[in-house]
């Protein structure tokens, strides 16, 4: 067993996406059937006849993951009249860390979990008030679709359903290869066990679904991950993932332009491709909702207005009216933007509702805002501050603290940190209802309990409001 060390680290979220393949000669593709609830009866035989194989069939959403080393495979399979589209497996972003440093409400709660007083986000969403009223998320199961969750961590082990942990990567990695999945899991459901941190829903259970590897988060892992979570009893899915990388040169437009075709044609081709890819994920999210699984996602860290779909591709600014910049744009998901206080260490009563400098925004994507952390206003500041025995630069405390694999705990900033606060609140709400609620009911309750933090109606920065427990 790996030893968990008592240490604190600082990590700020940066988005990276590097194309990677688990096998040098085999490529994965996503097959979109014409029917939303079935696949061609002979898909296995058809695929094998084209020198390919079916990796994962999901007839319940009319989607399959296949692979082949035959360069003619996708075009030949696309020709089948029972198939709508064959899509190249593309990467979504996983925010990567840049490592720099190793009750009542915080910072003076007196709680015996020694790092809890560093978790200002719990004060912001009124989590302790919910616990005092008996709402802890008990009886609720949360799936964390991420890089994997380190269930040997003493804060995570009590609530981790290790029997349900799984990976959908072509080449699975150890659950502790990256801090990200453990950090999000800890914010949701770290145990109230007199040690370290506490999750927003410390009575809930969770399991990790590994959909992100060293090169990013392939669609071929995310889609079956959603289906798996829903079919294994998840009441909530947390997806702290970034959007599709259309800028790095991996997109359809570049391939089209390289073939010497006109830009307007390439733009149209990309739009059609995006439409089919959106349909794949829409089917998955809608299926999860039908299984009474609430899906909470991060809005993204690009400081982009999701209501205006302008994307730079190959030096040109192209407009895609149907583009989804992140999973927060999809029907069937709850999108979360990131907020943070300024100089919380010296002013615990600071406003928690400041939209961070990096957070995406827009009415089409944001349903709620939640604590995501901001460490840039004080970057370079030499002023130090101490909370819970931790003496660091004051700006560090404006980030979000949570579990970090065998390193202990880490501060991080991103909409990745905001989404799990809302997933935890959703778990509290579902637990209050006996452990079973429709996603529409969870959304309605979150709306009723949110704090109006912007303009009337649905605000671009905060959606329906800043997420709160209602206590």
Image (cartoon, rainbow, N blue to C red):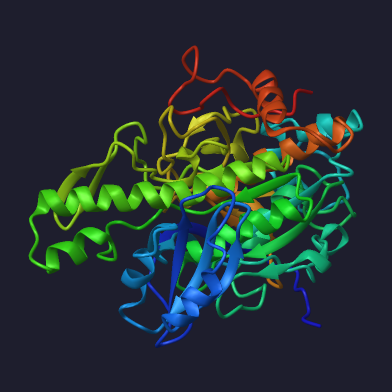
149 lies above or below 275: below
Residue at the location (34% across, 65% down)?
A: 79
Looking at the picture, does residue 159 appear above or below residue 405?
above
Residue 96 visible to the viewer: no
At 12% from the left and 68% from the top, the residue drawn is 259
Residue 345 location, x and y as percent?
Answer: 62, 41
Q: Foreground residue, 8 or 124?
A: 124
Answer with left or right where residue 130 lies relative to residue 182: right
Furthest toward the top, the residue is: 456
Q: How many marks?
A: 0
Q: Residue at x 77, y 40 (%)?
A: 427
358 sits left or right of 333 in the view: left
Q: Is residue 132 above or below residue 268?
A: above
Residue 50 appears in view: yes
Query: Residue 181 location, x and y as percent?
Result: 63, 61
Nearer to the camera, 403 or 361: 361
Between residue 219 and residue 192, name the one nearer to us: 219
Q: Position of residue 192 (x, y in %)?
A: 87, 50
Q: Residue furthest bottom?
A: 24
The quarter of the picture where the N terminus appears is: bottom right
For image coordinates 72% across by 43% down, the residue present is 291
Residue 268: percent from left, percent from top:
20, 48
Q: Quadrant of the C terminus?
A: top right
Front-lying residue, 357 or 389: 357
Q: Can you tell which quarter of the image residue 185 is in?
A: bottom right
Q: Quadrant of residue 419?
A: top right
Image side of residue 191 versus residue 399, left or right: right
């Amino acid at each position: 067993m790996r030893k968990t060390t008592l240490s604190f680290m600082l990590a700020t979220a940066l988005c990276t996406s590097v194309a990677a393949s688990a096998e040098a000669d085999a490529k994965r593709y996503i097959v979109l059937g014409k029917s939303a609830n079935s696949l061609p009866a002979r898909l296995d035989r058809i695929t094998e006849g084209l020198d390919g194989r079916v990796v994962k069939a999901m007839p319940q959403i009319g989607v399959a993951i296949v692979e082949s080393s035959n360069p003619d495979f996708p075009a030949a399979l696309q020709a089948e009249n029972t198939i709508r589209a064959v899509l190249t497996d593309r990467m979504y972003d996983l925010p990567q860390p840049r490592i720099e440093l190793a009750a009542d409400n915080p910072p003076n709660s007196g709680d015996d979990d020694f790092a809890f007083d560093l978790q200002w986000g719990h004060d912001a969403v009124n989590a302790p008030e919910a616990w005092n009223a008996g709402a802890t998320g008990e009886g609720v199961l949360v799936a964390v679709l991420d890089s994997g969750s380190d269930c040997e961590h003493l804060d995570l082990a009590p609530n981790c359903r290790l029997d349900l942990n799984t990976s959908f990567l072509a080449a699975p990695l150890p659950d502790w290869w990256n801090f990200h999945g453990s950090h999000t899991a800890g914010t949701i459901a770290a145990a109230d066990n007199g040690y370290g941190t506490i999750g927003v829903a410390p009575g809930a259970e969770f399991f990790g679904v590994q959909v992100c590897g060293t090169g990013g988060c392939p669609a071929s892992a995310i889609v079956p991950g959603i289906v798996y979570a829903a079919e294994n009893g998840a009441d909530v899915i947390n997806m702290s993932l970034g959007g599709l990388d259309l800028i790095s040169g991996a997109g359809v437009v570049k391939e089209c332009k390289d073939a010497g075709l006109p830009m307007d044609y390439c733009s149209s081709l990309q739009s059609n491709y995006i439409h089919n890819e959106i349909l794949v994920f829409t089917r998955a999210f809608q299926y999860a909702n039908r299984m009474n699984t609430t899906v909470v996602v991060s809005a993204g860290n690009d400081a982009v207005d999701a209501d205006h779909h302008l994307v730079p591709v190959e030096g040109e600014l192209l407009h895609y009216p149907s583009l989804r910049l992140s999973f927060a744009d999809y029907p069937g998901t709850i999108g979360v933007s990131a907020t943070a206080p300024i100089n919380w260490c010296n002013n615990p009563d600071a406003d928690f509702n400041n939209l961070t400098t990096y957070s995406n925004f827009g009415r089409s994507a944001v349903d709620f805002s939640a604590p995501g952390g901001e460490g840039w206003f004080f970057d370079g500041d030499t002023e130090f501050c101490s909370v819970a025995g931790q003496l660091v630069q004051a700006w560090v405390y404006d980030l979000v603290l949570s579990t970090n694999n065998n390193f202990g705990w880490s501060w991080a900033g991103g909409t990745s940190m905001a989404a799990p606060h809302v997933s935890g609140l959703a778990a509290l709400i579902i637990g209050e209802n006996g452990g079973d609620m429709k996603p529409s009911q969870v959304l309605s309750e979150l709306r009723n309990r949110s704090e109006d933090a912007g303009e009337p109606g649905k605000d671009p920065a905060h959606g329906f409001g800043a997420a709160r427990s209602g206590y």
